[in-house]
Image (cartoon, rainbow, N blue to C red):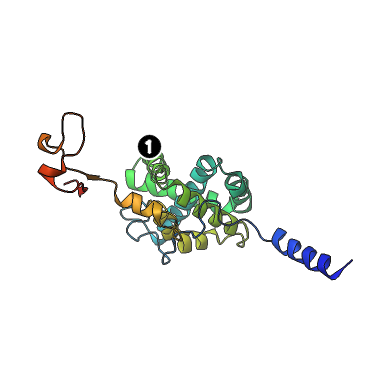
Amino acid sequence: MSRTLLVLAAALGTLSATPASAQFFLAQPDMKGTPVRGSDAGVGQVLPEATETEQRAALVWNMRAALNVAALQCQFEPTLLTQANYNVVLLNHADELKKSYDTLTKYFVRTNKTAKGGQMALDQFGTRTYSSFTTVAAQYGFCQTAAGIAHDAIFVPRGSFYKIAEDRTRELRNSLVPNGEQRYPRGILFARQAGMLPRLDDACWDKKGYWNAKKCGAFQLSPVS
């Protein structure tokens, strides 16, 4: 084999070993955040009188719910592997996830006095948790972020899924904020103009619907108040 072919083969081998990591953005928005605890604001529902163990269980369940939502919502981009990786997460961390669910069940029974009331509160908690990760405007960022977290969660030791929840929940919440391409920010500029309108009074428009610059000056957009 010639030197040229060897160089080409080596280059192709290097490229083929590099996984796709930017399905939507050339430069992905930075979603990273600081580690959290279950009692921190903005990471989940408030659980009055919850112990530290119960707060951790809620944080684990929030992360599980987020990856579940991603597995359902992000299948439009198969290379993210959100569904396949979520299924592996369920398998690898089944014991820890069950323990977290059992802990939450006991918490809601304890704070609602009856098993029926506790089950209703648990169901409501689950519905609100899942709904909190549903997004349309920020779907690309959420799917990309959730896919990376699910991939990493596969490889953490069993019994330590809670560490993924503590370290990555803030990042996941940040991804729910609409963002866009960072290298070429045209999409971001477009988003900044959302909620901007010109003057709509009749004096600024002629009978054919064209802007009347003589009466209202140069055409411009202003924030909607």
Give left or right: position of 59 versus 149.
left
Measured as percent of width and height from the top left, residue 196 is found at 24, 46
Residue sitting at 36 percent across and 41 percent down?
121
Residue at far top of view? 207
As rendered, which of 14 and 153 lies closer to the eye? 14
Compared with residue 14, is residue 213 higher up or lower down, i.e. above or below? above
Q: Is residue 64 above or below residue 168?
A: above
Residue 18 appears at what percent x and percent y?
Answer: 67, 61
Image position, residue 71 (x, y; %): 54, 43
Secondary element at image label 1: helix
Q: Residue at x 44, y 58 (%)?
A: 184
**Residue 42 in view here:** yes
* Residue sticking out furthest to the bottom: 3
Mark 1, residue position:
120
- The N terminus appears in which quarter of the rendering? bottom right
Find residue 14 and report its image quarter: bottom right
Residue located at (51% from left, 52% from top): 144
Structural crowding at the residue carrying mark 1, measured as other residues with C-alpha within 10 Å and reported as few (<14), some (14–19) or many (≥20):
some
